[in-house]
Image (cartoon, grey):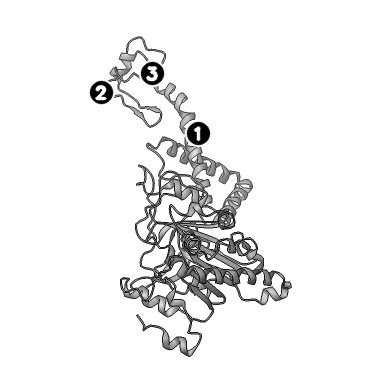
Amino acid sequence: MPGARSWPICSAASRCSRCAVWESGHSVWKAGRSDHSAAVGTPHGLRRSLAVACWGPWVLSRGLTRLAATAWWWGAHGRRRLPLAGLVVGVLVVALWFPAVGVALTALLLALAVGLGWAPGPVLWRPVAPGVGEGCPHEEPAAGEVPVAPLPTGVAAQRFPAGPGEVVLGLTDTATADRSVPARDGRGRWVEVAPLVWRTGPRATAPHLLAVGTPGAGATSLLRSVALQALGDGEAVLVDGSGVGEFACFAGRRGVLGTETTPEGAVAGLSWVARETERRLLLSGADRRVSRPLWVLVDRPALLAHLAWAAGAGDPLGLLDVPLRYGREAGVTVVLAEQVGVWESLAGALVGCTGARVVLGAVPVEQASAVLGGVPPRGAVSAPGDGFARLGTGGVCRLRVPATPDPWDESSDQGPRRAVWELLPAPASPEAARGEGGRP
């Protein structure tokens, strides 16, 4: 545009056919043609020098910023921070002893920064803290973002390698887990999976767990999976608040102290749990350590409380106050599972003392954030057992619960039912062995 000698870039309305202005949150000028230089009135060489002087520092700073963000992102998500830090320190030491090497490294760094700064479009990663995301977890990834890798499918309940007091809630992302373990998939092949390990016991930061899910999302399967692992070295009291017999397969098994399906039975069983917790608290430290861990698993506690109120049986949830508040010191762990839209009725210790949280199913992001205490990361919930978890003050991560159906449920697949049956403890007595149903 004639007269616009103060700035070498033409406007969008008057630019020529060979002069391009690229915009990606900013404008980057490219060299034009001599006829454009004549139109603008600035010599071509001077115009190029002005462009380099104006945009050179900006390109360099943009590239250095991208380098710093990339280093931070890999350090936050990777599991090789110490080796990488040692490598960086080693390179710096070499650069100090050999100035020529230091000059070459500096030149390489500046060249890489310039290349990143001049690269068009957004960077193909999002620098977020581990386990924390933004937006709805059921949305498609935005343009320029790396799609989330799918979690392994077809993994049924099995004996995962775990230490004392550790329970594998399910599978998660490799960057979130602190280990990888072998597991069998649906085809019987051994695959490496990343387990989400929940640590319980006297030093646990989140000794109790609350799972919230949509109907059919797998909250009851999560309770079965936890019970199968807990019965390896502990005892369990199972309470089915719905009364449909979700834990019938555990009846009469070794380590199972009771499987309650009625309000009266639930009140009686939880009353014993409260007294047992107080008895353990009165023991010395040595006697507590030799006591077997006691697990209390309650499915649909809100429904159980309503049925108990209607039947005049008492307040079963009030009996969980002592185990929830002092169970960690007594070796008592409480696991609750409730449905979305009902869990808000839980109050007191049932919410305040359940530091481990799990959300299963296609739950709106607002409700999932209320349960987890943090925004879930992006990732579609595509199958029963898919969801998110947060253990204590850690980050929110994805979770896929292993398929753990009722072995007597003929509507479920044969393979997972057989796997659950093989994991069940042995019958506690010959009478129980004769009274149980046939193998699925």
What residue type is disc 3 on? Pro
The residue drawn where x is 59% and y is 59% is: 206
- Could you tell me if residue 260 is visible in this image? yes
Residue toward you, 228 or 13: 228
Q: In the image, is 48 to the left or to the right of 97?
A: left
Disc 1 secondary structure class:
helix
Quadrant position of the N terminus in the picture: top left
Residue toward you, 1 or 318: 318
- The CA span between labels 2 and 3 is 16 Å
The residue drawn where x is 72% and y is 73% is: 283
Q: In the image, is 285 to the left or to the right of 306?
A: right
Q: Where is residue 161 shown, x and y percent of the image? A: 51, 72
Q: Earlier in the sequence, mark 2 or mark 1?
A: 2
What residue type is disc 1 on? Ser
Residue corresponding to mark 1: 61
Disc 3 secondary structure class:
loop
Q: Residue furthest left?
A: 17
Front label number (1 vs 3): 1
Q: Is residue 309 above or below residue 17?
A: below
> Where residue 8 is drawn, which disc sits there?
3
Residue toward you, 395 or 143: 395
Quadrant position of the C terminus in the picture: bottom left
The residue drawn where x is 50% and y is 73% is: 229
Q: Residue furthest bottom?
A: 430
Q: Earlier in the sequence, mark 1 or mark 3?
A: 3
Q: Earlier in the sequence, mark 2 or mark 3?
A: 3
The residue drawn where x is 40% and y is 16% is: 7
Badge 1 crowding class, 10 Å Cα cut-off, few under 14, some 14 to 19, many 20 or more, is some
Q: Where is residue 88 shown, x and y percent of the image? A: 57, 50
